Image (tube, rainbow, N blue to C red):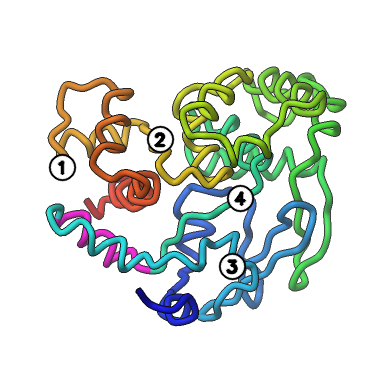
């Protein structure tokens, strides 16, 4: 077993792929000298070719090459993980992942990014690397803004979901507690919130709560499960369960490589 420091030195981060292209977060921006965002109300900045300062956010201690080696029975998956070397699955603040993925419902990545940026106009703003950056508004702020204002931003039917969920969180719905809960229990809890269906719940659990076995299934993943993993004719729920049986606690991490390969034509 390699020493943690040795593992970390082996890691590679492709910030363009991870922060802008992989559709797991939507408020990072490329700046003159790197990539920047306001995360949990604080500035975060990453330079190309450098290890990130916030190791936890970038899941930096995990050895992705070692993970890929566990799946030799799936040569296509190993090839994608090699070609997408530098892609990492982020560990975002739960609230920020929740807002972003409620907005993701029936949307494409470009449109999600536009909506997230508009909603973040209600949040903290600061300059990072000479560029104006915006962070997510607190639940109380989003609840006060209300559905009408959110609808005017272009959120459509998601505006009501955002307002209702923001009120629930502002009133004490424990998002942070989801991290320590067992995956199934956390999923059931999240599904109680407005605008959170099975796919959104799994996205929040994976990208916000660190439940790496969470396996979001959308149209791209359903196609991949049918074509490469022998799950033709199964429901999306059964595909999720099947993937978790195959990949265990790596399911969500592997999912991100499959998802990106499918949506970009690499697969």
Q: Find the distance from the CA under tag 1 to the CA under tag 4.
A: 29 Å
Q: Considering depth in this image, is 163 or 61 the residue closer to the camera?
A: 61
Q: Considering depth in this image, is 184 or 145 the residue closer to the camera?
A: 184
Q: Is residue 138 above or below residue 250?
A: above
Q: Earlier in the sequence, mark 2 or mark 4?
A: 4
Mark linked to residue 216: 2
Q: Earlier in the sequence, mark 3 or mark 2?
A: 3
Q: Earlier in the sequence, mark 3 or mark 4?
A: 3
Q: Give yes or no for contact between labels 3 and 2 (Cβ–Cβ under 8 Å).
A: no
Q: Earlier in the sequence, mark 1 or mark 4?
A: 4
The residue depicted at 74 percent of the width and 52 percent of the height is 40
Mark linked to residue 92: 4
Mark linked to residue 228: 1
Q: Considering depth in this image, is 227 or 61 the residue closer to the camera?
A: 61
Direction from residue 254 to residue 4 in the image, left or right: right
Find residue 133 and report its horizontal and vertical position in percent. Answer: 75, 58
Q: Nearer the viewer, mark 3 or mark 2?
A: 3
């Amino acid at each position: 077993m390699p020493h943690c420091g040795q593992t970390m030195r082996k890691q590679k981060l492709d910030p363009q792929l991870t922060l802008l292209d992989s559709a797991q977060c939507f408020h990072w921006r490329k700046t003159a000298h790197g990539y920047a965002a306001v995360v949990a109300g604080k500035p975060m900045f990453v330079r190309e070719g450098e290890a990130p300062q916030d190791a936890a956010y970038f899941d930096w201690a995990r050895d992705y090459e070692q993970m890929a080696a566990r799946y030799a029975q799936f040569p296509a998956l190993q090839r994608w993980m090699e070609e997408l070397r530098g892609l990492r699955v982020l560990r975002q603040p739960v609230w920020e992942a929740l807002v972003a993925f409620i907005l993701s419902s029936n949307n494409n990545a470009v449109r999600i990014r536009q909506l997230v940026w508009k909603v973040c106009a209600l949040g903290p703003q600061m300059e990072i690397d000479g560029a104006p950056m915006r962070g997510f508004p607190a639940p109380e702020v989003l609840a006060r803004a209300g559905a009408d204002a959110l609808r005017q931003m272009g959120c459509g039917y998601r505006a009501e979901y955002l307002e209702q969920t923001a009120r629930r969180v502002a009133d004490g719905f424990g998002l942070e507690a989801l991290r320590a809960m067992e995956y199934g229990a956390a999923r059931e809890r999240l599904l109680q919130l407005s605008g959170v269906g099975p796919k959104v719940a799994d996205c929040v659990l994976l990208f916000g709560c660190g439940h790496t076995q969470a396996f979001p299934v959308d149209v791209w993943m359903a196609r991949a499960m049918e074509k490469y993993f022998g799950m033709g004719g199964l429901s999306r729920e059964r595909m999720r369960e099947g993937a978790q049986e195959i990949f265990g606690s790596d399911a969500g991490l592997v999912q991100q490589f499959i998802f990106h390969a499918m949506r970009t034509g690499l697969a």
